[in-house]
Each structure stands twice: as structure tokens, then as C-alpha cells.
Image (spheres, helix red, strand yellow):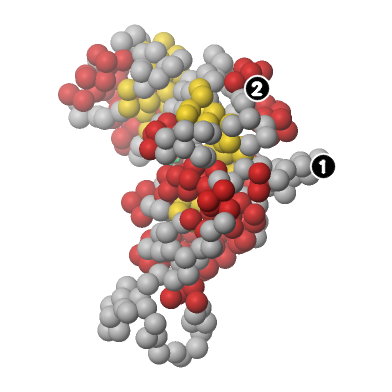
Amino acid sequence: MNKKQFDITQLVRKNIAGLKPYSSARDEFTDFDQDMIFLDANENPYENGVNRYPDPQQRNLKSILSDQKKVSDQNILLGNGSDEVLDLIYRAFCEPEVDNIITLPPTYGMYTVLANINNVEEKKVLLNEDFQPNVEEIFNTVNGNSKLLFICSPNNPSGNLIDRGRILQILERFEGIVVIDEAYIDFTDKKSWVEDLNTYPNLIVTQTLSKAYGLAGIRLGVCFASVEIIDILNKIKPPYNVNELTQQRALERVRDKDQIKTEVNTIIEGRKELEKALSQVSFVEKVFRSDANFILIRVDDANKRYDQLIKERIVVRNRSTQPLCESTLRFTVGTKEENEKLVEILKQL
Ligand SMILES: *Cc1c(COP(=O)(O)O)cnc(C)c1O
């Protein structure tokens, strides 16, 4: 595939294009290997493990992610959860009250929240009945101020992967930036869009350590994009946006690839068993196909079933207010014991 023609300088907000990144003490002197006396950052000098500011560029963590994901560390930016990464993308490219973004509901709610916070118009183009993008409809809606288009694949809350051919058409035709949110990519055997970064300079891929990696509590999101886009986002990120404890804990965990793999495989097995069991429950009308660690089902009466489950001390997500999700509940795959308990209770209701 030939590389798409694309000029990022046409898309970035004018005030951002002219910025120099804030230079912190830890940016200006980085040669940690030497036995230096650090008197530059007004820290407390007495060691307790976290008395020093963290590395603002998270070099150790990026280096290992770079090896594992097979992309240069120059193509990676880390954030305080992928929610921070998404917010940085809005702030870099969307002029409030002027630009707009395209979302494909039903999808992840943060795209809307961030559009509202940043005072950027959201244009919604519903997925079709199979939860796939309606490409013609998208390009009827796009205009010259459409800066970002969000594709969540596998999609939350429906669980399915978005068709590769449709994403390719969107990448080819869209003149703004396509953000592919791969929060659940580790639960599929399909390849990540990270491999296509070199062909599509208008592509940003986001991932997270919150789901498959089991680190929702430490808040670490990962952004993959061209060097040009990463440089722009680096200008506006808070200098110490990923704290020292998060960096240490993430490093430990990403090195433990085998453990993560084992857990992910067990979750996928659990999903398959849960899918089978759910389809045998009398009031379950449809079990949607999932490539993630959750399952969306359509039931006879979602509010009633939700309340019944709460009484049984099981909390699920009622997604019924989302378009195309009338009377649906979303279940995260739990441990084997949790899944069995869930099925046992559902059969009794
Ligand atoms: C859970 C989730 C995220 C994760 O966000 P973090 O801020 O990294 O925890 C991102 N996108 C989608 C679609 C999600 O479901």
C-alpha cells in the first residue's frame, strides 16, 4: 500500500503549533547513569523510593513496550490512562466551537464526555445493525472541520471487532485523524492497527493497561502514532503525567508476559463458556458476538433483570439507553467461580 498523502500541520490548532514543550528539571538533565548530586528540582534529598520526580518521558517503560509492540519508542506517548491520551488529542487538534469530531454509536462514552468538556461538536453516525460502520453515511456527515473520527475496535459496548475493509476505506478517505481505540485488542487473535502506522500518517492507535494487563488501578494508557503527531502531543502533556509508582508497577507487569497471556486465555475460555450458558437462559433473546472480555446480551426486560441481579449481589451494566442497544445488559467476564455463580443465578430468575 502506498503511503497516504497527509500534512499534519494543516490540522493542528494554531496556538499549539507554535508551542515549545515545558522543559522540566528532569528534561534538561537526563544522564542518570552517572553518580550525580541532584540539586536541580527542589526535591527532598532523603531517599524513600519516590522522593524524586519521575522520568517525564518514561524511557524504561517505552523501551520495553517498543520491543513488545514492534514500534519505535518515538512513536509512543504514555498517559494517565487512555482517557488522558484521548483528551490530549482533542486539545491538540480541535478548535472549540469551530471543529467537530465523528463518533460511531453505540460506543465508548468518553468520546462524548471529552467533546463536551472541550466544547467541540460531536457528529454521530450510528453503526448498522451488525455494529459495523456505515461508510457512506459517515462521508455524508463529514465536513471540512471534521478533525477526528473515533473507531473503537473491539467496540464497547457491543464487543465486536470493526471490519478491516471498512476501516481501510475510512482511513483512505478521511482527511482528519482516525483514532482507533484498541482497549480490548489483547482479547482477539486479530492484528493491531499499530502495524499500519507507516502507511497511514493520519492514524492514531490507543491501547491501555487497564483491561488485559490487569492494571486499571495504576492508570496507564498508550498512544501509538507518527513521530509528528507524538511530538505535538508531547508539547501539551503535563510534564510528569505518569507517576513513579505507575511506571514501576507497569514495568514489572509488562515483563511478565506469560502471566498476562495465561490470564487472557483463561478470560477468553470463560467468555466462551459464558456465551454458551447465557444463550440457554430463558429470558435471554440474543447473545452478541464478542471479541473482548465482556458480553452484551438482549433480554426481555433489562431494568427488571438488572434489579434482580443487584438483589443477588451481582453488578452488571445496563446499556439499554444506548442506540441499537434496547433492553441490553453487558457482563464483564469474571473468574470461573464468578461466571458459574452468575449463570446459576440467571437460571433461577
Ligand atoms: C476501558 C476502556 C478504555 C480504558 O481507559 P483507561 O483510561 O486507559 O482506563 C479506553 N477505551 C475503551 C473503549 C474502554 O472500554
Image location (x, y in percent) of residue 17: 58, 53
Residue in the picture at 81% in, 40% down:
1
Q: Which residue is at 48% across, 55% downward? A: 236
Q: Which of 203 and 257 lies nearest the eye of the viewer?
A: 203
Q: Are marks 1 and 2 in contact (CB under 8 Å)?
A: no
- Seen in the picture, residue 85 relative to 72 is either above or below; the reply is above
Label 1, on which residue? 2
Secondary element at tag 2: helix
Q: Quadrant of the C terminus?
A: top left
Q: CA distance from mark 1 to mark 2?
A: 22 Å
Q: Is residue 124 above or below residue 244?
A: above
* In front of the other: 343 or 68: 68
Mark 1 secondary-structure assignment:
loop
Q: Which residue is mark 2?
A: 139
Q: Residue at x 62, y 26 (%)?
A: 143
Which amino acid type is shown beneath numbered disc 2? Phe
Left or right of 46 on screen, residue 138: right
- Viewer can see residue 82: no
Q: What is the crowding at mark 1: few (fewer than 14 residues within 10 Å), some, or many (at least 20)? A: few
